[in-house]
Amino acid sequence: MLQMRPSCEHCDKALPPNSREAMVCSYECTFCADCVEHVLGQVCPNCGGNFVPRPIRPSHEWRPGVSLRHQPAREDKVFKPVDEQDQKEFAARVRKTAPEAR
């Protein structure tokens, strides 16, 4: 199940479960859209993968037992600011390969 991490790993911006700014890679590394675009260059600094918008977990229980109340978001943060120059060089190398071929 998706972890729904509470904040951007780089800038620590709050990303609540209903945030439209949360972006994730396939390993659920979580960053805000601003950092993904302007700092990370659309490349995950941890795995080299690409990012997609994180789904929003429904707060309303549309089906019995399935909602944010029953499967809450994580509360513990992952805060690992990246070295921006290193990430710029890393992203430049990785972006040469399409996400499906990485």
Image (cartoon, rainbow, N blue to C red):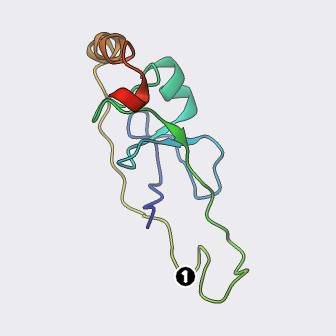
Q: Outermost residue toward the bottom?
A: 64
Position in image of residue 93 (x %, y %): 30, 12
Residue at image coords 36%, 27%: 101
Position in image of residue 55 (x %, y %): 60, 54
Image quarter (top left, top right, bottom left or bottom right) of the N terminus: bottom left
Up-down: is 42 above or below 60?
A: above
Q: Which residue is mark 1?
A: 70
Front residue (pair 15, 95):
95
Residue at image coords 47%, 24%: 42
Q: Secondary structure at mark 1?
A: loop
Under mark 1, the amino acid is: His
Residue at image coords 65%, 56%: 18
| Crowding near the residue tagged with mark 1, few <14, some 14–19, many ≥20 C-alpha atoms within 10 Å | few
Up-down: is 86 above or below 43?
A: above
Quarter-wise, where is residue 44 in the image? top left
Position in image of residue 21 (x %, y %): 61, 40
Up-down: is 82 above or below 89?
A: below
Front residue (pair 26, 8):
26
Q: Is residue 55 left or right of residue 74?
A: right
Image quarter (top left, top right, bottom left or bottom right) of the C terminus: top left
Position in image of residue 24 (x %, y %): 47, 43
Residue at image coords 53%, 22%: 37
Front residue (pair 16, 41):
41
Up-down: is 89 above or below 59?
A: above
Quarter-wise, where is residue 17 in the image? bottom right
